[in-house]
Amino acid sequence: MKSELVKTADALMDDISADPVNWRMWEDRLRQVIAGHADNNMDLPAQLRVYADWLRQDDLEDQFENMPV
């Protein structure tokens, strides 16, 4: 399972590196790979940590924007 996750993460990073400006089109796969690493207690590769931080920041901003007034 872990080797499959590593292969998937590598393939995902290859896909993103082909068009890094449009990385958001891979957001669902990114979230799945990040969650898979967390579920298996695996450290994220450095490249994925960057995207994980960006996604986390987006989630926090969405949460703030949707706060009741």
Image: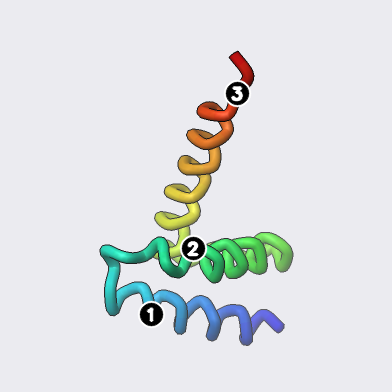
CA–CA distance in space, label 2 to label 3: 24 Å
Q: Position of residue 26 (x, y in %)?
A: 45, 69
Per the image, label 1 sits on a secondary structure element best described as helix
Residue 52 vertical position relative to residue 3 in the rendered view, above or below: above
Per the image, label 2 sits on a secondary structure element best described as helix
Q: Position of residue 34 (x, y in %)?
A: 58, 63
CA–CA distance in space, label 1 to label 2: 12 Å
Q: Earlier in the sequence, mark 1 or mark 3?
A: 1
Q: Label 3: which residue?
A: 67
Neighbourhood count class around disc 1 (C-alpha, 10 Å): few under 14, some 14–19, many 20 upward? few
| Residue positioned 37% across, 81% down in the render | 14
Q: Label 1: which residue?
A: 15
| Residue positioned 46% across, 63% down in the render | 48
| Residue positioned 46% across, 48% down in the render | 53
Per the image, label 3 sits on a secondary structure element best described as loop
CA–CA distance in space, label 1 to label 3: 35 Å
Tag nearer the camera, 2 or 3: 3
Disc 2 marks which amino acid? Glu
Disc 3 marks which amino acid? Met
- Residue situated in front as seen by the camera: 22 or 68: 68
Q: Label 2: which residue?
A: 27
